[in-house]
Amino acid sequence: MFWGGAQIIFAFIYEYLTTNWRYLVLGVMATPSFIIIFGVYFLKESPRYLYFTEGKLTEAINTLNEIAMINHKDTFTSEEILILTHNFTDEPEKKYNYWHLFSFASLRRITIPTAFVNSAFDITYYSIQFSFSSLGLSLFTNAVYVGFGEIIVYIIASFYDIIVI
């Protein structure tokens, strides 16, 4: 839904604020980068990283308790954390790859149709995107119509509990 909305917004920006698409792309790419650059200073290390990688149990508990307070949940004691982490340290880490999606019949029945539907969706979507100029209206109007169409489809799909990526 946000993709369709962003497409409409960028069509308006391109049509009315700038006529050079390079400036639009530069602005679109630079904005999230600046947000991340300034936001990274406010992030804390994850409790999992602090405990398992750095071995800092007290800092991990403090960070976990801060997260729990923000989410209005009960705080943890060090004994509870040690009980929880004991289960993780005994098991060896399993490594998976894409071939594991085909190793079981139940996963194959999900993976193959999903890959087919996703490929068909991508081909259809990008065929429309690349042929904007041949749809009969201006590039701006076509982009706005496709954006509204995406928003409508996302709203309809959300009522039927369909996951749309």
Image (cartoon, rainbow, N blue to C red):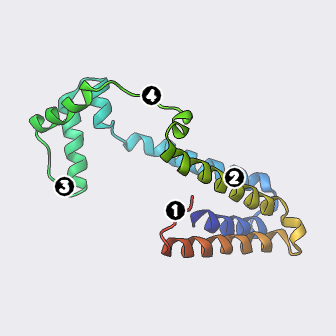
What amino acid type is highlighted by mark number 1?
Ile
Q: Which residue is mark 3?
A: 73
Q: Which mark is residue 66?
A: none
Q: Which residue shows up at 50% across the image and 73% down it?
A: 160
Which residue is nearer to you in this view: 90 or 75?
A: 90
What amino acid type is highlighted by mark number 3?
Lys
Spatial CA span between label 4 and label 2: 26 Å
Mark toward the viewer: 3 or 2? 2
Q: Which residue is mark 4?
A: 95
User: Picture quarter containing residue 89?
Assistant: top left
What amino acid type is highlighted by mark number 2?
Ser
Spatial CA span between label 3 and label 1: 29 Å
The secondary structure type at the circle numbered 1 is loop
Above or below residue 48? Residue 114 is below
* Mark with earlier residue (2, 1): 2
Q: Looking at the image, do the residues carrying marks 2 and 1 touch, with CB atoms under 8 Å apart?
A: no
The secondary structure type at the circle numbered 3 is loop
Mark 3: few, some, or many residues within 10 Å (few <14, many ≥20)?
few
Mark toward the viewer: 3 or 4? 4
Spatial CA span between label 3 and label 4: 32 Å
Residue 48 lies, in percent from the top left, at: 30, 34
The secondary structure type at the circle numbered 2 is helix
Q: Looking at the image, do the residues carrying marks 3 and 1 touch, with CB atoms under 8 Å apart?
A: no
Q: In the figure, is residue 76 to the left or right of 1?
A: left
Q: Which mark is residue 119?
A: 2
The secondary structure type at the circle numbered 4 is loop
